[in-house]
């Protein structure tokens, strides 16, 4: 008896074709997940920077005892006192 064990070429091609179809479906899904994670990481980093600046000013602005008033006109805000050097834009 001649018992040859192995796969035929058709069987191997069918497996490769199935793996290619799975890859075509999975790659865009994984790419979208990675891009969403990058966007959320950037957003979280921005919030971290904002929190850090709030903490910095809370620790270092103890000497200001007057109330700060801002004049916002023409899409710009300026502090009414010279103790705080602030200029910004309202969007």
Image (cartoon, rainbow, N blue to C red):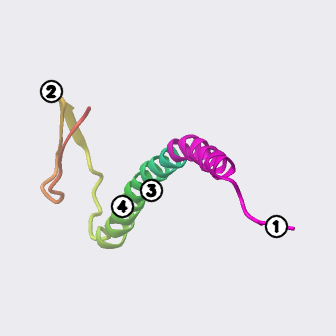
Point out the image quarter for the C terminus: top left
Under circle 2, the secondary element is loop
Mark in front: 3 vs 4 = 3
Side (left or right) of 65 relative to 5 = left
Q: Quadrant of residue 25?
A: top right
3D distance between C-alphas at marks 3 and 1? 62 Å
Q: Position of residue 66 (x, y in %)?
A: 27, 57
**How would you rate the neighbour count of disc 1 (Cα within 10 Å): few for under 14, some for 14-19, many for 20 or more?**
few
**Circles 4 and 1: CB atoms closer than 8 Å:** no
Residue with the mark numbered 3? 41
The residue closer to the viewer here, 52 or 83, is 52
The residue at the point 56 percent across, 47 percent down is 23
Under circle 4, the secondary element is helix
Upstream in sequence: badge 1 or badge 2: 1
**How would you rate the neighbour count of disc 3 (Cα within 10 Å): few for under 14, some for 14-19, many for 20 or more?**
few
**Circles 4 and 2: CB atoms closer than 8 Å:** no
Q: Find residue 43 and name its label.
A: none
Residue with the mark numbered 2? 74
Side (left or right) of 34 relative to 85 = right
Q: Which residues are magenta?
A: 1-29
Upstream in sequence: badge 4 or badge 2: 4
């Amino acid at each position: 008896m001649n018992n040859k064990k192995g796969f035929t070429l058709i069987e191997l091609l069918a497996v490769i074709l199935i793996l290619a179809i799975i890859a075509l479906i999975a790659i865009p899904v994984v790419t979208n997940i990675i891009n969403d994670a990058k966007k959320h990481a950037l957003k979280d980093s921005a919030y971290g920077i904002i929190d850090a600046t709030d903490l910095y000013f809370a620790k270092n602005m103890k000497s200001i005892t007057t109330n700060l008033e801002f004049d916002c006109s023409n899409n710009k805000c300026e502090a009414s006192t010279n103790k705080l050097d602030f200029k910004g834009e309202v969007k």
